[in-house]
Amino acid sequence: MLKYIVRRLFSLVFILLGVSIIVFLLVHLAPGDPVRIMLGEDATEADVERLNRIYGFDRPLPVQYFIWLGNALQGDLGTGIRSNLPVTLLIFERMPATIELALWSLVLAIGVGIPLGVVSAVRRNSWIDFGSMFAALIGVAAPNFWVGLILLSQIALYVPWLPIGSRGPSFPEALLAIVTRLDFVVFWDHFRYVLLPALALGTSIMALITRLTRSSLLEVLGRDYVRTARAKGLREFTVVYGHALKNALLPVITVVGVQFGALLGGSIVIEVVFAWPGVGRLIVSAISQRDFPVVQGSVLMLAVVFALVNLLVDLSYSLVNPRIRYG
Amino acid sequence: MASIASAPAVATRRRMNPTLRRVLRNKSIMFGSVIIVALLVVALTGPWITPMDPLRQDIWERYEPPQGIWVDGEFNTRYILGADELGRDLLSRLIIGARVSLLVGLIATGISLVFGVILGAVSGYVGGIVDDVIMRIMDVLLALPGILLAIAIVAALGPNIVNAMIAIAVVRIPTMARVVRSDVLAVKNEEFVEAARALGQNHLVVLFKHILINAWAPALVLATLGMGTAIVAEAALSFLGLGTQPPQVSWGRMLSVGREAIRSAPHVTLYPGLAITIVVLGFSLLGDGLRDVFDRRLKDT
C-alpha cells in the first residue's frame, strides 16, 4: 500500500509538471504579444515595458517557464492585472466556495440517487421504476447549466426563501454557529443558497447513481446468497438492506469517485449561472478581462485539486472494498 | 401444423446477417436513430423550413410568449415558440442552430477520431518509448477536467467557433487514444497479424489493414457517445461567450442570452436546452445500443 502511494505521488508530480507546461504555454499560444493583448491596443510604451519587465516576456521561453514555475512552487502565481492583487490570494479566497459546491452536489446526488435506485430495483417495473428511469435518462443528457437555468426560472422565482444567485454563509461558518451557539439559522441560510446550484451541478451524477444502484442491486438480488437468505425466512427488508445493498453499492462508489473530479470542471459553468463566487467564475471573468496570470493560476490550482481528489478516491477504494489490494 | 406450413417460407427467406438483426432489434439504437435522423433532416433543410426569418428583428415583439401552432382556429406560423430579446422567432433560430450543433459535433468528433486512432494505434503497435511518451502526454491532458481544458484552450486561441471545435477535439483525443491503444494491444499478438508480417507486408499495412479493421467497434461507439459530449461542450462554451459569436446562431448562445430574462421570458431558455437534451439523448441511446451490439467489453466505461 505504501509503495503504491509513493508510486502514485511520484507520477502525480510528473503529470502536474506536464500540466504546468500546458498552462504556461497557453499565454504564448495566443496570437500576438501577450502584453499587448493584456493591456489593450491603447497601452502606452511605458506600461508595456513595465509589464514586460515584471513578467520577463522579453526572455527566451524556457527561461520564462522556469522562472514562472519556480515562483509558482513558492506560492507566487503572479499578480492579477485588473485587481492588482496576488493571484494566490484571489484563488484561495474562492477555492472553498467551489469545493463546497462540489461536495454538496455529491451529497445531494447520493442522498437522492441511492434511495431512488433502491426503490426502483425493489419495485421493478412499477410506475415509480419507470418514472425514475425516465428521469435518469433525461438527467444524464441534460446539460447541467440548462438544468440550473430551469431551476432558477421555474422554482427559485416562485419560492420566496430560495435566492436566485450568489452565496450565503460558508459551511464552516454555519457549523461554527451550530457548535458554539446552537444556532441553526446560519446553517439554514447557508443551505438555501447552495441548494439549487448543487442540485443543478449534481443532476447527471445523481441520474448515474440512480441507474447504477438499480442495475447493480437487481444483479445482486439474483445471486445465490440472496436466495439463501430468503430461504432462511428472513424478512424482505433484511434481505435487501442487510445483505444485498452492501454489495450492490461497490460499483456505485467507484462511479462516484470517478465523477467527483468532473464536478470541479462542471462547476465552472454552474458558478456563472448562479453567480456563485468560486474559482470557475474567477476564470471566466479573468478570460473576458484578458487577465492571463489569473487564468493560468486558477487553471493550475484546479488541476492540482482535481489530481489530489482523484488520488484520494483511488486510495479509498481499498478501504471500501477489501478485495482490492494495491501491491 | 402451422409450424410445418411455414417451414418452407423460412427456408426460402434470405437469411439476415445476425449482427444486422441485432442492430434492428435493439430499441436503444432505434430510438436514438429516430432522434438523430430528425436532427439531420432539420439541419439539412434548415433555411427552407423555418417559419420566419431567424435574423429579422422586431423590437415590438420582444420576448413574445409562445403562440402555439393553432391560433383562433387557424394554422399559425408566427412565433410558435415565442420570440427572443430582439423579437426574433425562437423556433426558426432553433432550426438554424441545429446546424451549428451538428457541425461542431461532427467536426470535433472527427478530429478527435482521426488523431485518437493514429496516436492510439501507433502507441499500441510500436510500444516502447514511443508508447510511453504518447501515453504520458495523454495522461497530462486527462489531468485537467475536460471542460476546464476546453475553456483554457479557447481562452488562449481566442473565442470563436473554430477554436471551440479544436478545443473540444483536443479534450476528446486522450480517451479515444487510450481505447484504440488497448484494442491494438489486444489484437497485436494474434496469429493472423504474425502471418501478415511473415508474408512480408510492411508495418503500416499490417496496422491499418489487419489490426485496426478488427478494432474499430469501440472507437465507433466512443465517437457516437462523444458526439453528445461535444454538443454539450459547444453549448457550454457558447453559453460562456467563448464559442459561436453573433450573428451566428447556436443553442448555447441562445441560452446565455436567455439567462438575462429568466424572470420575464422563461421560454427563451426552455426550448434551446430542451433541444440540446433531446439530441444528446439521441446520441447516447445510439451509442449505448451500438455498444451492446458490437462491444460488450466496453460495457462499464
Image: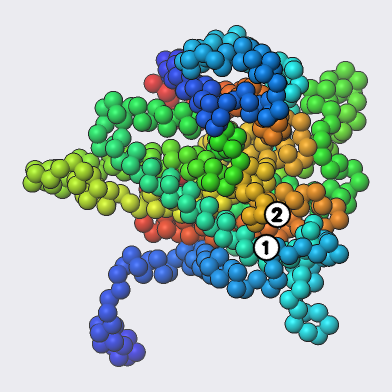
The residue nearer to you, when weighing B118 against A307, is B118
User: Quick one: SS at disc 1?
Assistant: helix
Could you say where residue A276 lies in the image, as x and y percent from the top left?
Answer: 76, 34
* Numbered disc 2: secondary structure: helix
Distance, label 1 to label 2, CA atoms, is 9 Å
* x and y percentages locating residue B115 in the rendered image: 38, 42
State yes or no: discs 1 and 2 in contact (Cβ < 8 Å). Answer: yes
Q: Is residue A302 above or below residue B235?
A: above
The quadrant of the rendering that contains the C terminus of chain A is top left
Residue at 52% over, 30% down: A29
Q: Is residue A112 left or right of residue B261?
A: left
* Left or right of B148 in this view: A39: right
Residue B297, label in figure: none
Relative placement, left or right, of B117 versus A182 is: left
Q: Which residue is mark 1?
A: B93
Disc ID at residue B254: 2
Colour convention of the picture? rainbow
Task: Please state which of residues A150 and B239 is positioned toward the viewer in this rendering.
Answer: B239
Q: Which one is in front, B256 or B126?
A: B256
Number of numbered markers: 2
Structural crowding at the residue carrying mark 2, measured as other residues with C-alpha within 10 Å and reported as few (<14), some (14–19) or many (≥20): many
N-terminal-most mark, 1 or 2: 1
Can you see residue A70? yes
At label 2, the amino acid type is Met
Given the image, what chain letter belongs to the residue carrying mark 1? Answer: B
- Horizontally, residue A160 falls left or right of residue B64, namely right
Could you tell me which residue is drawn at 48 percent across and 48 percent down? B108
